[in-house]
Image (cartoon, rainbow, N blue to C red):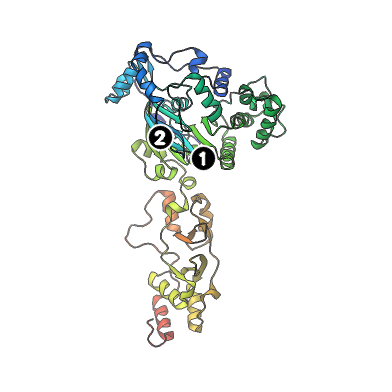
Amino acid sequence: MVAPAHAVSRCRGRSRPTRPTQRAPVLSTAQAVHSACSGESVTEITAVKAEATASEAEHTTDAAAATTTAPAAPGIAVKADRLYKAFGRKPHDIVKKLQNGASRDELAHLGTAAVIDASFEVQRGEIFVVMGLSGSGKSTLIRMLNGLLEATSGTVTVGGTPITGIPAAKLRDVRRQSISMVFQHFALLPHRTVIDNVAYGLEVQGMPREERLAKARTIIRLVGLDGWADNLPSELSGGMQQRVGLGRALAADTDVLLMDEAFSALDPLIRREMQEQLIELQAELGKTIIFITHDLNEAMFLGDRIAVMRDGRIVQIGTPEEILTDPANDYVAQFVQDVDRARVLTAGSVMEPARSVVTVTAGPRAALRTMRDLQTSATFVLRRDRSFAGVVRDRDVLKQVKAGDGDLRAIILDATAVSADTALVDLVELAVESDLPIAVVDDRNRLLGVIPRVTLLAALGNVSPTTGEMPVMEPPATISMSIITETLRETASEGVQP
């Protein structure tokens, strides 16, 4: 699963700064792990100041104001409000010019505008994916969410606590208690065993050895590494090493997990396995996950919502279906054009109103009239409580009407029904096996809509299912309308319309 080649080319060829600029400090593996687990920032570890002293003094008031930002709403785990991150000699000047309408390219000679005016809210228990190509600013953004990089402007709130501009000691406490991070290249300590790597964050927090090892063993089982606790990272496959990294983040028992390209270094099959396990773990543990990726298919598979970034800006936030079916601009549209729609779109997003429907109490004559009027050979049947009962066919109903049998229940046949969140890829085989539209029901088995085969094929091919105003009815009639009308007339009671 890779980003479309045509999309890659869209972000190439940007003008580069013509003078030296300040870049984000590069950490070794050990420094990065210690930073994430202990709560120390990149600045504390490297002793590198992110902003020039003169600009910093100019904006002291802004930083102080950030610490008094109103806390996030109870359902919000992480909130970013107008975040900017610029690297250069005068990063605050870059931000001011951006806010006054200057473009990123126009300011390239002053430095790098890595993140520009990013705002979003992540709900508790949500998997929020930030997606973009190399250079889009996604990794810089995620490092501002836990304070590894200090925002040039804007605020971040984690669990109701503003973390922008707060004292270093308080920021470390927020990291230890509220937010963990999983790295792209595993970031394991090679001289430590699996269990000691998983327990490392707990060790930094000061938890007694026996207690932290007991907790680590539980997490090791949870991530599927039972029996490997005493092995060194060098004895594990890439997928297993990433499980250790995930286990270390889970062991810290924070509410929020930041995952920066966590599966990008894995082979496709192992990556898919890890993606599925992450969804299972999130469902079981209820963690809030902010996941960074350049892989659109991965974003579509994992994300409850997706933020698409380009050149430092968030260009669209939406559900996978919204981004696929209603892209905000040409860039997003081109980005998603090669996505496997069958794995993203769901039954609920393409279903149509069920037109050929009768209740079981309506009787066979009503069912036959419905099929005649809609020119179809089958109609769905609902019980008295409006739950889905099945389907009746025109030939069976015709025989029943001729026989004078008024009980429709005797000829109801089973029909396939799926939930609204079923992926279209799981409907293809069902559509091949039956000429009936696929019924879509809710958790109480009530009929929500139907998916005719022509609609399913149109959704998969991203084309309109019909060129006319009248809907295509499936399955087509197998008995002539005149025969049905004649039968209804012959069997009609006095005063009853055929």
Q: Is residue 65 above or below residue 50?
A: below
**Image quadrant in which you'd find residue 469:** bottom left
Residue 107 in the image: x percent, y percent?
31, 19
Question: Which residue position holds label 2?
Answer: 120
Q: Is residue 395 above or below residue 491?
A: above
Residue at image x 48%, y 54%? 420
Q: Is residue 16 visible?
A: no
Q: Amino acid at mark 2?
A: Phe
Q: Is residue 332 left or right of residue 246?
A: left
Residue 217 in the image: x percent, y percent?
69, 32
SS at badge 2? strand
Residue 21 in the image: x percent, y percent?
38, 14
Residue 172 in the image: x percent, y percent?
52, 22
Give the numbered dot on residue 43: none
Ranked by sequence position, the earlier of labels 2 and 1 is 2
Query: The C terminus appears in which quarter of the rendering?
Result: bottom left
Using a 10 Å C-alpha cutoff, classify the residue at mark 2 as few (fewer than 14 neighbours), some (14 to 19) or many (20 or more).
some
**Image quadrant in which you'd find residue 237:** top right
Residue placed most toward the observer, 454 or 409: 409
Q: CA distance from mark 2 to mark 1?
A: 15 Å
Question: Which residue position holds label 1?
Answer: 125
SS at badge 1? loop
